[in-house]
Image: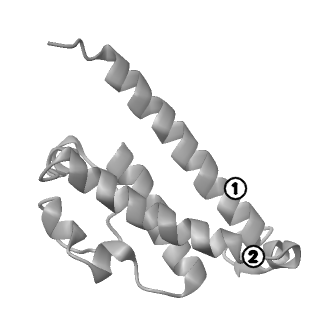
Amino acid sequence: MVWHLTRVQDHHVADLLDAEQIWVSGDWAGRFGLTADPDNTGYGHSPAQVAAVRPESAQALIDYYEAVASRTGSFVAGLRPADLDRVVDEGWDPPVTLGVRLVSVAEDDLQHVGQAAYVRGLIKPG
């Protein structure tokens, strides 16, 4: 769940920045046993595809999230209120604005963080 929420944030924010995803520009994919496919965000994965996401360590997951969150934070910190009304996706009716896209990313991430926390609570120590 944490890999997926980070991938979605990386994918969407890179698109908003018109920049390469951190997943693609670094050695992140290799650290997760995957290829650097920019379209692989975990959405619609089969059980076999989920099982293929194998981070080399918990730290790899933390490091990737921190790299993505840092870029997202820098991007958001530089926004002005008027920027939020810029249309970023004409493929929807109504078209999606920057503000709506950022809320969508935050909502998706928060939902998945809650799911990850729930699963973590199911794991009994020792």
Give the class, few, some or many, for how many residues have Cα within 10 Å of label 2's Cα (few <14, many ≥20). few
Disc 2 marks a residue whose amino acid type is: Leu
Quick check: 30 left or right of 2? left
Q: Does label 1 or label 2 sit earlier along the sequence?
A: 2
Q: Which mark is residue 103?
A: 1
Between disc 1 and disc 2, the foreground one is 2
Determine the residue positioned at 75% across, 76% down.
79
Residue 83 or residue 39, whichever sits in front: 83
Residue 90 or residue 12, whichever sits in front: 12
Q: How many numbered marks appear?
A: 2
Residue 73 or residue 103, whichever sits in front: 73
Q: Is residue 31 above or below residue 21?
A: above
> Badge 2 is on which residue?
79
Quadrant for residue 81, please give it.
bottom right
Question: Residue 25: x and y, percent?
Answer: 30, 82
Secondary structure of the residue carrying tag 2 is loop
Spot the residue most to the bottom.
Answer: 18
| Chosen colour scheme | one colour
Is residue 34 at all visible to an observer of this figure?
no
Secondary structure of the residue carrying tag 1 is helix
Quadrant for residue 115, please give it.
top left
Determine the residue positioned at 36% across, 42% down.
1
Determine the residue positioned at 67% across, 64% down.
101
Q: Is residue 42 above or below residue 23?
A: above
Quarter holding the C terminus is: top left
Disc 1 marks a residue whose amino acid type is: Val
Give the class, few, some or many, for how many residues have Cα within 10 Å of label 1's Cα (few <14, many ≥20). few
Quadrant for residue 111, please give it.
top right
Question: Residue 84: x and y, percent?
Answer: 80, 72
Q: Which mark is residue 112?
A: none
Q: Is residue 115 above or below residue 31?
A: above
Question: Residue 63: x and y, percent?
Answer: 31, 58
